[in-house]
Structures are given as structure tokens and as C-alpha cells.
Amino acid sequence: MSIAEELVKSREFNDIFLLVKKAVYRTLGRRRVGLMLGLSDMPSTVAAYYSPNIIVLNRKLIEKLKREADDENIIKSYIFEVLLHEYLHSLGYDEAYTSELAYIICKNNLGEDHPATKISKYGIRSILQSVKEIDEDLNRPVRMKPKNIEFIKGFDSENVTYLA
């Protein structure tokens, strides 16, 4: 089964992240483990950020996309692309090279016409026209603090070998 087909069948963040890791390994031969995923309310201009060992996604932006997207695969593609982008940062790539690599990885593993590939090249508005204007509530200043992060349990746990 292709990564694109697996993405359609994915059900949660960890499923999508495993596909991100598979695509990166196939393309670059690199990987890392031990990342955590969190959701937090952030300004609309921030899709996500990477802090050592933590990828934090913008919860409000994902919720907005869920309300506006007619196709669940658009949401999965968006999450794939954002997780890919931040995962590449966790591997040590800078912003300019990360954007280029994200496009190459999406194109090679999902195809030129896949929504994630289009998002990596042109942004979310290229595939979801209804996100032309970001709601005012998303633009409200939000303090990004660790206490505001909701951590996703079981994220990136495929290589955990100890008993908790």
C-alpha cells in the first residue's frame, strides 16, 4: 500500500506521523525518535513550531480547517505536511531548506497532485479556497506557554522499549 493510500486510512496524529517518518526515511535515509506532540492555541500565522523534542500544532487552525473542509483527506494532508515540516526541523534542517525538502518528500512519496504536495508548494489556501480570511478569534494575541499545550498520548511511541 502506498503512503498516499495509508494516509487516507489514517485515523489519528500518530498514524499520520508514522507515514511522515516513513516518507522522510525513504527519501533522505534519516530518522529520529522520542518526539512529543502537543496542541496549543496560537496566532493564525503560526501553523506549528518545533521546540527540542516537541512538535506543537496550532489547535485553533486545525479546528477551523475541520469546520471548513468538505474532505477529511484535506485535513489529513494538511497535518501530514505540517508534521513533515516540523519533523525536518527536528532533524536539523533550517527553514529555507525544510520548505524545499518538504515539497520534494511530498512529491516523491504522495505524487505531484496530492493535496499535501500542493500545500507544501503553495500553502493551505491553494487547496481550500474557503480559508481566504482568517477569523478574528484566531488573530487574537495568544501567549505560547508550555502550560497551554495539550499533549497527545502515545505519540511517536513505536520505539519505546521500557515499561512505564
Image: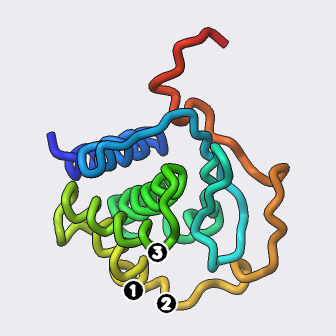
Residue for point 56% across, 30% down: 154
- Label 1 sits on residue: 129
Residue 98 x, y percent position in the rendering: 44, 66
Quadrant of the rendering where the N terminus is positioned: top left
Q: Secondary structure at mark 2?
A: loop
Q: How many C-alpha atoms fall within 10 Å of the one at disc 2: few (<14), some, or many (≥20)?
A: few
Classify 77 as above or below 46: above
- The disc placed on residue 132 is 2
Determine contact: label 2, label 1, CB under 8 Å.
Answer: yes
Residue for point 62% across, 9% down: 163
- Label 3 sits on residue: 96
Q: Is residue 123 left or right of residue 151?
A: left
Residue 68 x, y percent position in the rendering: 47, 74
Q: How many C-alpha atoms fall within 10 Å of the one at disc 1: few (<14), some, or many (≥20)?
A: few
Residue type indicated by callout 1: Gln
Q: How is the image coloured?
A: rainbow
Residue 49 x, y percent position in the rendering: 62, 62
Q: Is residue 144 left or right of residue 133?
A: right
**Cα separation between marks 2 and 1:** 6 Å
Residue type indicated by callout 3: Ala
- When asked about the image quadrant of residue 69, the answer is bottom left
Residue type indicated by callout 2: Lys
**Label whose residue precedes the other's in the sequence (3 or 1):** 3
- When asked about the image quadrant of residue 15, the answer is top left
Quadrant of the rendering where the C terminus is positioned: top right
Q: Is residue 111 left or right of residue 119?
A: left
Front residue of 100/40: it is 100
Mark closer to the observer (2, 3): 3
